[in-house]
Amino acid sequence: MNNTINMKITGMTCQHCVKHATEALEAVAGVDSVEVALEPGGAVVIGDADSELLIAAVKEAGYEADIV
């Protein structure tokens, strides 16, 4: 079963940041698809990935993240 996980991501300032955050999230096991938006600063992740792993991936990429 695929879940929809909504995330708030702060610290992104440009489309390169969006690409970097997208790649970080796509690398997490269980992620089927990702859509990251610069404004309002968030992501929608589809899949069975662990929320804590998603947050950790975004933080490792250099941004702050929370599940909303």
Image (tube, rainbow, N blue to C red):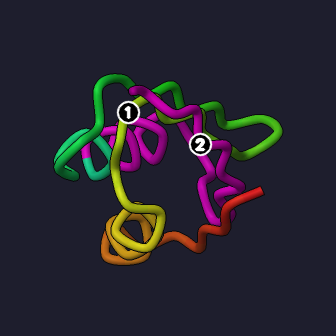
| Magenta stretch: includes residue 4 | yes
Q: Secondary structure at mark 1?
A: strand
Q: Which residue is mark 1?
A: 47
The location of residue 54, given as percent across then percent down, is 40, 61
**Residue drawn at point x = 42 percent, y = 27 percent:** 2
Marks 2/1 in contact by CB < 8 Å: the verdict is yes
Tell me the kind of residue under disc 2: Ile
- Using the image, determine if residue 68 lies above or below residue 16: below
Give me the C-alpha separation between circle 2 and circle 1. Answer: 8 Å
Q: In the rendered image, which quarter is residue 23 located in?
A: top left
Task: Identify the image quadrant of the C terminus.
Answer: bottom right
- Using the image, determine if residue 39 lies above or below residue 33: below
Label 2 Cα crowd, 10 Å radius (few <14 / some 14-19 / many 20+): some
The location of residue 36, given as percent across then percent down, is 54, 33
Q: Is residue 27 left or right of residue 8?
A: left
Q: Is residue 65 left or right of residue 53?
A: right
Instruction: Name the foreground residue: 34 vs 15.
Output: 34
The location of residue 38, given as percent across then percent down, is 66, 37
The location of residue 46, given as percent across then percent down, is 45, 28
Q: Which mark is residue 5?
A: 2
Q: Is residue 68 left or right of residue 31?
A: right
Q: Secondary structure at mark 2?
A: strand
Residue range in magenta is: 1-23
